Amino acid sequence: MKALSVRQPWADAIASGQKWIEFRSRPTQYRGDLVICSSRFNEGYVVDVNGEEKPLPLGVMLCVVKLIDCRPTKKADAKQPGYGGADGYFSWILDNQIDILVPKPVRGMVNFFTVPDDEIEFAPEGKFWFDYM
């Protein structure tokens, strides 16, 4: 399945449904399922899980979303997490259907890359990445 590396905390924001636009410097013609992976960079972000701080995972697959559109970024997109305000960027629009994955290590890339289907394991309903860390 096609995959995309996203820096934290934005990868977690996509997996948790708080972010449905990914901002990129180039457009894409691709539409369809996409594995969102956290990049290995941007250490230091934590999330509160039942009163305990847990570091956001780095270098793992987090969820599957559907990329449904790509368009030039609009001013209205500024309300989305991760908006950098740069002219010439593109908004990759994600569907709100999110399938959480068991977080397994993955070696990401700058552009699209492929995660073998047999390495993708969907988490049971109600489970999130922190249930495995």
Image: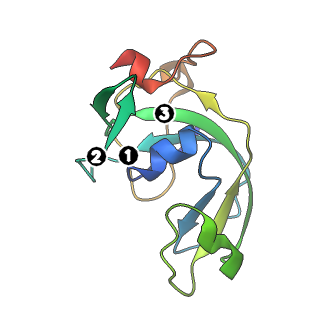
Of the residues tagged 3 and 1, which is closer to the observer?
A: 3
User: Is 25 displayed left or right of 20 in the figure?
Assistant: left
- In the displayed structure, would residue 123 be above or below residue 33? above
The answer to which of 128 and 25 lies nearer the viewer is 128
User: Is 118 displayed left or right of 49 in the figure?
Assistant: right
Q: CA distance from mark 2 to mark 3?
A: 13 Å
Residue tagged 3 = 62
Q: Amino acid at mark 2?
A: Arg
**What's the residue at 36%, 37% (across, down)?**
47
Residue reaching furthest to the left: 44
Residue 107 x %, y %: 34, 40
Residue tagged 1 = 108
Q: Residues within 10 Å of mark 2 (few under 14, many from 20)?
A: some
Q: Amino acid at mark 3?
A: Leu
Mark with earlier residue (2, 1) = 2
Residue 69, located in which quarter of the rendered image? bottom right
Residue 29, located in which quarter of the rendered image? bottom right
Residue tagged 2 = 40
Q: Are marks 3 and 1 in contact (CB under 8 Å)?
A: no
**What's the residue at 32%, 20% (across, down)?**
133
